[in-house]
Image (cartoon, grey):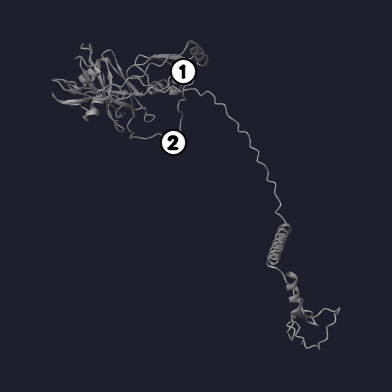
């Protein structure tokens, strides 16, 4: 069967005598090369020279897909090589070796033992007390009762210098300030060392009217020498305390100056001791008044000291003329009724205007100092002599 069909197909077709293309048996012209098939066409000779006609290439679908994939792969390889070449051609930035920082070991300081300073005791002032004045009471009575000064009562209640009060009045009485604890006395070794430094000393007992500054002025030494010799941390001294005053380094006596001595009228003297408002008891036999010199007085000039008992029933005034800068108030001026009295005193420079030494007459030659007051309690014993 298959053989018969093949023969039928062979008989129904023919080949083009020029290009050899199989065409239909009844065809009169070749569809490929256009040669007429009328029996006159001459078969085309095979030529070794290629025809100008491009040979026809036939490919299947699978071949075309494979060829496209191959081309894409080649393009990808070319791009990859170009990119790698560009990267290889660009010189990389040289690496700079940064210096390695070496940490310096920190030195740890060993803390030293710091001595602990002992805080100094502080004194808290106590509030004032309210006191109702009784009949026939004076400021000195109240001051002696509460062991305070009259001046503190005057300042706390805005009173005058005469301290006039009336029965039934309420006064503010300041409480006395606590006295610091006693300063430890020097050890025997310290006293021996100080004695080796200065052997010219004098021992004194502090009275109620003494101050460290006044003692230094009296003995013409510095306050620091007294503090160092007695191991004093401050300027506070107590009544009855024994002090040793070194006299080895006494201050030089002021010599003549180039400035002229002030001429009269002289300025008012500056009062030193006792301080205003100081209180003296019945055991004090005398009171020393001290002031600062105003100038080198002339031969006929002196200091006039005026003392007055403000609380005495009768007028009691004492006027003294001295050439020194201190005056010791005698015991004969002390009150005799056993009550505290307010004593007022002042100092001025006076000049003698006559030549009679037995009955001198003085006149003021300068300004009068400020008035100071202190209290003095009498013993109740009448003096044997009058001031």
Q: State left or right for residue 377 relative to residue 204.
A: left
Quadrant in which residue 207 is drawn: top left
Q: Which mark is residue 229?
A: 1
Frontmost residue, 74 versus 55:
55
Frontmost residue, 69 versus 149:
69
Q: State left or right for residue 152 relative to residue 101.
A: left
Gap between marks 2 and 1, in whole Å?
A: 36 Å
- The answer to whether residue 246 of the structure is visible from this angle is no
State the SS at label 1: helix
Q: Can you give x and y, in whole percent of width and height, for residue 16 in the image?
A: 78, 82
Quadrant in which residue 18 is drawn: bottom right
Q: Can you give x and y, in whole percent of width and height, for residue 118 in the image?
A: 44, 22
Frontmost residue, 203 versus 53:
53
Q: Residues within 10 Å of mark 1 (few under 14, many from 20)?
A: some
Counting residues from the start of the chain, the first of labels 2 and 1 encountered is: 1
Front of the two marks 2 and 1: 1
For the residues labelled 2 and 1, say whether their Cβ atoms are less than 8 Å apart: no
Q: Can you give x and y, in whole percent of width and height, for residue 295 in the image?
A: 38, 30
| Residue located beneath label 2 in the image | 259
- Total count of labels: 2
Q: Which mark is residue 30?
A: none
Quarter of the figure that contains the C terminus: top left
Quarter of the figure that contains the N terminus: bottom right
Q: Can you give x and y, in whole percent of width and height, for residue 261 in the image?
A: 40, 34
- The answer to whether residue 109 of the structure is visible from this angle is yes
Q: State left or right for residue 326 relative to residue 379.
A: right
Quadrant in which residue 142 is drawn: top left
State the SS at label 2: loop
Q: Residues within 10 Å of mark 2 (few under 14, many from 20)?
A: few
């Amino acid at each position: 069967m298959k053989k018969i069909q093949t023969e039928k197909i062979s008989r129904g077709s023919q080949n083009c005598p020029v290009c050899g293309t199989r065409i239909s048996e009844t065809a009169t012209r070749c569809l490929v090369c256009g040669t007429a098939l009328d029996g006159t066409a001459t078969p085309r000779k095979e030529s070794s020279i290629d025809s100008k006609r491009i040979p026809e290439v036939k490919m299947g679908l699978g071949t075309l897909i494979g060829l496209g994939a191959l081309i894409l792969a080649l393009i990808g390889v070319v791009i990859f090589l170009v990119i790698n070449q560009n990267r290889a051609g660009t010189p990389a930035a040289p690496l700079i070796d940064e210096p390695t920082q070496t940490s310096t070991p920190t030195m740890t300081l060993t803390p030293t033992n710091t001595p602990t300073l002992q805080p100094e005791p502080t004194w808290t002032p106590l509030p004032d007390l309210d006191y109702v004045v009784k009949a026939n009471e004076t400021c000195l009575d109240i001051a002696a009762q509460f062991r305070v000064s009259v001046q503190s009562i005057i300042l706390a209640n805005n009173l005058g210098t005469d301290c006039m009060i009336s029965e039934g009045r309420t006064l503010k009485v300041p409480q006395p300030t606590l006295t610091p604890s006693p300063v430890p006395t020097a050890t025997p070794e310290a006293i021996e060392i100080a004695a080796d430094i200065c052997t010219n000393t004098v021992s004194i007992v502090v009275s109620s009217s003494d101050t460290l500054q006044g003692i230094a002025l009296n003995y013409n030494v510095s306050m620091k020498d007294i503090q160092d010799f007695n191991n004093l941390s401050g300027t506070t001294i107590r009544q009855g305390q024994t002090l040793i005053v070194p006299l080895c380094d006494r201050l030089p006596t002021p010599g003549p100056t180039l400035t002229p001595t002030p001429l009269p009228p002289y300025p008012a003297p500056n009062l030193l001791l006792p301080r205003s408002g100081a209180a003296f008891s019945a055991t004090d036999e005398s009171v020393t008044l001290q002031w600062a010199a105003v100038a080198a007085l002339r031969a006929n000039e002196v200091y006039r000291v005026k003392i007055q008992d403000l609380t005495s029933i009768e007028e009691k005034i004492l006027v003294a003329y001295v050439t020194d800068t201190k005056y010791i108030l005698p015991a004969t001026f002390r009150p005799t009724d056993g009550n505290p009295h307010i004593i007022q005193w002042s100092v001025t420079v006076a000049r003698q205007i006559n030549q009679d030494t037995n009955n001198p007459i003085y006149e003021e030659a300068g300004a009068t100092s400020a008035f100071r007051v202190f209290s003095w309690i009498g013993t109740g014993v009448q003096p044997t002599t009058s001031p």
